Amino acid sequence: MTSKIDTPAKRNKLPIAKKPAWERLAPGVFLGYRKSPEARKWLVRYHDPDAPKGASNPYKMQVFANADDAHVDEEALSFKHASVEALKLAEAASVPSAKGAHPLTVRRAVEEYIAVRNARERKNKGRVDIRSDADTRLSRNVLSDVDLCDTKLKDTTRERLLEWLDNVPLQGRDEEAACRGLQSGTTARRGKVCEVPSSDMEGRDFQCSHREKRRA
């Protein structure tokens, strides 16, 4: 069945209505989109596992985010991201069909890795108020790319990763470290070539010139 709510263009065609438009994500779990004059909202509806048998309305419903239609805040969610969040909410409510139903996206893989690294760092240092280096770097350089993060891991291509890598800004120390690691005077970094005269590699105040280089 063709989705009516998976893109902003499709959602713009929907009329303003009190009743949401629903899309099934898993057995007993639905993602909803409600369009009102004031807002565009994502909702989740799931079968309540604690509902009495024969209940007239065994479902629970919750509004959880703004949709990424035009003229909304920066934290609004895309359809892909909203689908993941809706399934997480259903899974947290112990809906059996939600477990394992949300797709393995780049975001999910990175967030789960960050959680493991943070837990290890906090255990080693005996503190609960610190973030691992992986958390800081991946949050800044990966989780900030919403389009990449909403991509299913199995659909992530080499070309897409190289495109992302080319847009990751080099910090001052990172750039200096990359240049100081040169042995022959040139090295590849993020799809670029960094060239430093060998006579300048001993000093701190050198400059790097970059040129684009296609990866084989």
Image: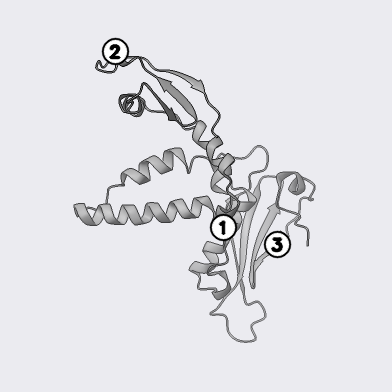
Given residues 58 and 11, the one toward you in this image is 11
Does the rendering let one see residue 75? no
- Mark 1 and mark 2 residues within 8 Å of each other at the beta carbon: no
Mark 1 or 2, closer to the camera: 2
User: Taking 125 as reference, is 72 above or below it?
Assistant: above
Position of 80 with respect to 8 (left or right) is: left
Mark 1 is on which residue type? Val
Q: Secondary structure at mark 3?
A: strand
Mark 3 is on which residue type? Glu
Residue 58 in the image: state x and y as whole percent. Answer: 62, 77
Given residues 126 and 117, the one toward you in this image is 117
User: Taking 155 as reference, is 187 above or below it?
Assistant: above
Cα separation, mark 2 vs mark 3, equals 63 Å
Find residue 23 and name its label. Answer: 3
Asked where in the image residue 23 lies, by quadrant, the reply is: bottom right
Residue 154 in the image: state x and y as whole percent. Answer: 58, 55
Find residue 84 and name its label. Answer: 1
Query: Residue at 25% across / 54% down in the picture?
Result: 122
Residue 107 in the image: state x and y as whole percent. Answer: 50, 50
Mark 3 neighbour density, 10 Å: few (under 14) some (14–19) many (20 or more)? many
Classify the position of the N terminus by image quarter.
bottom right
Position of 202 with respect to 11 (left or right) is: left
Residue on which the image places disc 2: 199
Position of 24 with respect to 1 (left or right) is: left
